[in-house]
Image (cartoon, rainbow, N blue to C red):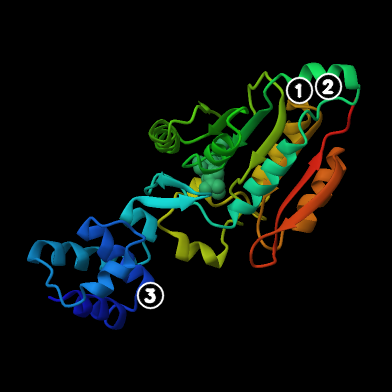
Amino acid sequence: MQIQKALAAACSALGLERLDAQLLLLHVLGRPQHDRAWLLAHDSDALDPETEMRYIKLTRLRAAGTPLAYLTGVREFYGLELRVDARVLDPRPDTETLVEWALEVLQRFPIRVEDTSVQVELAKAPPRVIDLGTGSGAIALAVKHTRPDAQVSAVDASVDALAVARDNAQRLGLEVHFRQGNWLDGMEQCFDLIVSNPPYIAEGDPHLEQLGHEPRLALTSGPDGLDAIRTIISQAPARLWPGGWLLLEHGWNQAAAVRTLLVRAGFMDVQSRKDLAGIERCSGGRWPQA
Ligand SMILES: C[S@@+](CC[C@H](N)C(=O)[O-])C[C@H]1O[C@@H](n2cnc3c(N)ncnc32)[C@H](O)[C@@H]1O
C-alpha cells in the first residue's frame, strides 16, 4: 500500500487524527517524529508488507484509545525526549506550567533565611528539590536539566514507574536521586522546593473511562480526588526549609480547594498558576521564615 493510502485509511476508516496517523507511520518507518515533510515528499512510495502490518496494528491500538506516546515509546517534555510506556502516566504539556513555576522559584534561591550573612553561605549550597510522584521522571529531569546545580530527588510508590524514571535519567545523563516511598514518609532531609503532580481525579469520575490505559495509581485519589494533595500538604511543612515552597498540580476545578488547604496548613503567598488553556492548573505557597 502507498503511504498516502495508508494515511487516508487510518484517518477515514479508523477515525485517527492526521497528526497521529503521520507520527505512527514515521515510527514504523524508523524516521524521526519531526520528519512529516518526508511523508509528503514520499507519499507515493509503497510500504513493505511487514511495515504495513505493523502500521495497521498500531493504528488500531490508537483508535482504541492507547496513548500515542505508549505506541511510539517517546514523549517530548520540556525539550527532553522521555521514554514512556504503560508503567507511567503519559506526561502532559500542562505539567510544563508546574516546571516553569518551579524554575522561577529556584531563580530566587537562596530562599531559606533572610539574614544576609547566612545567605552568602547558603548561596554556595545547592538548592534542594524533591518531585513527589515522579512517574517517568518528567518534572525532576526537566528541573535538573535546566538547573544542573540543584540537588534533585524524586519519589514514587510504583517500582515500575521508578524503573522508567531511572532509565530516562541514565539515558539523558541527569543525576537524580530516586527513591520508592509513600510521598514524604520516612524522609529525613529538608528541601527548598517540593513539587508534585499527584493523582487528583475523583474515584468514579466519568473521564476515567478514557484514561483506562494509564496506571490507576497515577490517576485517582479518593472520593474528591484530593486525598494525595491533603497528605502532601500535611507532610510538607516538616520537610521544607523556612522560606521553602510547595507547588502542586491539580484538577481544573480544584484550585480554590487546594488554596484553602494550603492556607489552613499555614502557608504564605498562596497563589495559583494557569495552564496554556487559561485554567488554574497549579497552586502553591511558601512556608514562613522562622
Ligand atoms: C499524575 S502521575 C504524575 C507523573 C509525573 N510526575 C508527571 O507529571 O508526568 C502521579 C504519580 O504519583 C505516583 N503515586 C501515587 N500514589 C503515590 C504515593 N502514595 N506515594 C508516591 N507516589 C505516588 C504514581 O505512581 C504516579 O507516578
Q: Quadrant of the N terminus?
A: bottom left
Where disc 2 sits, the SS reads: helix
Position of 272 with respect to 127 (left or right) is: right
**Who's the residue at 38% across and 49% down the image?**
86
Q: Nearer the viewer, residue 28 or 238?
A: 28
Give the amino acid at mark 3.
Answer: Glu
- Between disc 1 and disc 3, the foreground one is 1
Give the amino acid at mark 1.
Answer: Ala
- Name the spot of residue 107 as percent of width and height, x first: 73, 37
Q: Earlier in the sequence, mark 1 or mark 3?
A: 3
Q: Earlier in the sequence, mark 2 or mark 3?
A: 3
- Name the spot of residue 51 as percent of width and height, x first: 14, 62
Provide the residue designation for mark 1.
123
- Name the spot of residue 282 as percent of width and height, x first: 70, 52
Specify few, some or many for label 3: CA neighbours under 10 Å numbering under 14, 14-19, or 20 or more.
some
**Who's the residue at 67% across and 62% down the image?**
252
- Name the spot of residue 70 as percent of width and height, x first: 35, 54
- Between disc 2 and disc 3, the foreground one is 2
In the image, which disc is placed on residue 119? 2
Provide the residue designation for mark 3.
17
**Alpha-carbon distance for marks 1 and 3?**
50 Å
**Who's the residue at 59% across and 52% down the image?**
95
Q: Quadrant of the C terminus?
A: top right
The reply to whether discs 1 and 2 touch (Cβ–Cβ < 8 Å) is yes
